[in-house]
Amino acid sequence: MPFGLTNAPAVFMDLMNRVCKPYLDKFIIVFIDDILIYSKDEKEHEENLKAILELLKEEKLYAKFLKCEFWIPRGEKEENAFQLIKQKLCSAPNLALPKGSKDFVVYCDASHKGLEQDIPKTAFHTRNGHYEFQVMPFGLTNAPAVFMDLMNRVCKPYLDKFIIDFIDDILIYSKDEKEHEEHLKAILELLKEEKLYAKFLECEFWIPKVQFLGHDIDSRGIHVDLAKIESIKDWASPKTPTEIRQFLGLAGYYRRFIERFSKIAKSMTKLTQKGIKFDWGEKEENAFQLKKQKLCSALILDLPKGSKDFVVYCNASHKGLGVVLMHREKVIAYASRQLKIHETNYTTHDLELGSVVFALKIWRHYLYGTKCTVFIDHKVCNIF
């Protein structure tokens, strides 16, 4: 068979895999017409070499003697090179190929046994055979959503009482150490019942401050992530609409910490619109620097204690909507947005009522089913 044909390498690779299957990945590795035989010592290497040569002879496959290399002892130069490579790879994970005598099972950090009829959907083929995932891999399109649903159902008895879960991250919060011990025990027993296992090395216990979903949380409240703020502090002035979007995307993640966020960003946002010439002037630079300054000196947002005494402050103008959620005279969150095109035609009282609706929608999880006080600065709205 000549090697100039389109699929000749693939056909020959398949042949070699079938021929060498009894010893594949036990003491040989095959790639097309290259065979690597590895052994612990000379005696074992001699036995392995003899077995392979007899196998090739039976299949009428012959190796060119002049192109073969046999039992090469390492000299000082090779030993030094080997040790250098070894040092580079000493922290690399161990990767084990599937053994012929065992099922190929992939264990994920966040995994749960799937339905039998779904297993064939995850099948894939390698040079060593056909394999199927026995647990849910995180490369499938809807795997995160399915696993999130599973975690919500599993953790439902304790959800939002003393735990918050996000896919495979579980945050357990308690008032004191004794209560925390009880909560931790309850969650671990629950996971054990459902055959869901946590990696011990990736867990943190008894910590007074935790980083969760890009925020630092402690007994004082919620802080911005200092690592992200450092990158904002050193951010150079944008030179293209794409760079503006990148900056606003990162800054927007912490918009709840910044009062009048949308109003400050308005001049910058305009430059990202289609048909608008990019002209970065003094006004835009001032807005950019002001936003950086506010993010770097962001307030600590308080966590609500109880479900009563919420106060919402609303304000609206033709520049945008701005609202503040407070609980017992402490700020819980800020929110703002620019007006949509049709909203620019609204009357003042319609805009004010629109800001109330905006606040009640985004903070529904705090305000639903509770009495709250809403303050607006427009007298006409008092009749509603």
Image (cartoon, grey):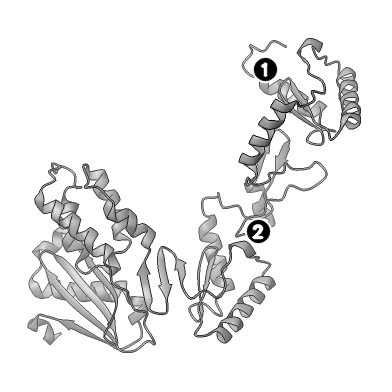
Question: Crowding near pointer 1: few (<14 within 10 Å), some, many (20+)?
Answer: some
Task: Give the number of the disc on residue 176.
Answer: none
52 left or right, relative to 265: right
Judging depth in this view, the residue of 351 and 203 nearest the camera is 203
Separation of residues labelled 2 and 1 (CA atoms) = 39 Å
Relative to 372, is 137 on the left or the right? Answer: right
Query: What residue is rendered at 19% in x and 56% in y?
Result: 289
The image position of residue 4, as x and y in percent, is 63, 11
Q: Quadrant of residue 194?
A: bottom right
Q: Is residue 36 left or right of residue 185?
A: right
Quadrant including the C terminus: bottom left
Q: Which amino acid type is shown beneath numbered disc 1?
A: Ala
SS under mark 2: loop
Residue hosting label 1: 8
Circle nearer the N terminus (2, 1): 1
Q: Position of residue 281 (x, y in %)?
A: 10, 47
**Foreground residue, 64 or 359?**
64
Q: Which residue is mark 2?
A: 114
Residue 16: where, in percent of width, then height?
77, 24
Q: Amino acid at mark 2?
A: Gly
Query: The N terminus appears in which quarter of the rendering?
Result: top right
